[in-house]
Amino acid sequence: EPEVTQTPSHQVTQMGQEVILRCVPISNHLYFYWYRQILGQKVEFLVSFYNNEISEKSEIFDDQFSVERPDGSNFTLKIRSTKLEDSAMYFCASKPNRGGQPQHFGDGTRLSIL
Amino acid sequence: AQSVTQLDSQVPVFEEAPVELRCNYSSSVSVYLFWYVQYPNQGLQLLLKYLSGSTLVKGINGFEAEFNKSQTSFHLRKPSVHISDTAEYFCAVSVISGGGADGLTFGKGTHLIIQP
């Protein structure tokens, strides 16, 4: 069964540094998402992406965050100047089309900011 | 805006006993409803979904859930649990809208602990 893959599985970064989290969505999917889960808290929506542009973003997704689909397969989340509170598990998800089709999640990238 | 409430942060259950994990939601518009499971060090796996039609939906691993519109609930049940069901369970909703790209709103999760 096709899977959403995320790399790296664990990223350690110094505060203030830029970090890029990478995702390869399922190949025929059209909608892409990023979520984060701070340790011990619930999964929170960050952003959705369709047709090469952001469709929706949450209040968390401020100017330090950006997303990109640089080629036909990758979907990236960039955090420009990381803060301690950015430490979390970041999940990428994709779904094939609009409507109620469920989102398929990757295994996540654990981001640790020192 | 939508919100999802999972009242129980932890539910301990003996093996082979039945279990119900509660989920209530709040939304001013119609929503789709989902249950996801997260095993340790893994991503979120879809258990089941409610889009429309029959209010009782069956999912993987013997789980089922019932949508109750009047009570705005979507409780998850399994008649007989196994040790392998130990995991974190998340209820989530997404808005039924024309855009189609709506993100999921999750509850805080319920940790199901199966005791031998």
Image (cartoon, coloured by chain):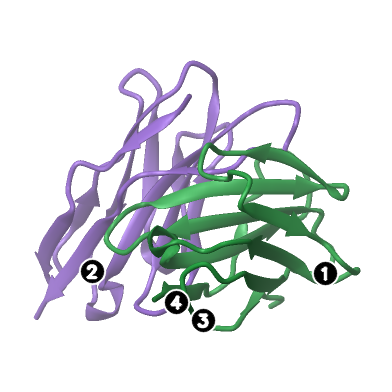
Chain colours: A green, B purple
Crowdedness near tag 4: few (<14), some (14–19) or many (≥20) residues, C-alpha within 10 Å: few
Give the residue at mark 1: A27
Spatial CA distance of label 3 from label 1 is 25 Å
Count neighbours of disc 3 (C-alpha within 10 A) and say few if under 14, some if 14 to 19, many if 20 or more: some
Question: Where, by quadrant of the figure, is residue B6 drawn?
Answer: top left
In this view, A1 is above or below B30 = below
Are discs 2 and 1 located on one and the same chain? no
Residue B78: name its quadrant.
bottom left
Residue B52 placed where, x, y %? Answer: 58, 32
Residue A72, x across and y down, in percent: 90, 68
* Residue at mark 2: chain: B
Mark whose residue sits in front, 2 or 1: 1
**Tag 4 or tag 2, which sits nearer the N-term?**
4
Residue identifier under label 3: A11
| Rendering coords of residue B75 (x, y %) | 31, 42
Residue B81 numbered tag = 2
Residue occupying image coordinates x 79% and y 71%: A74
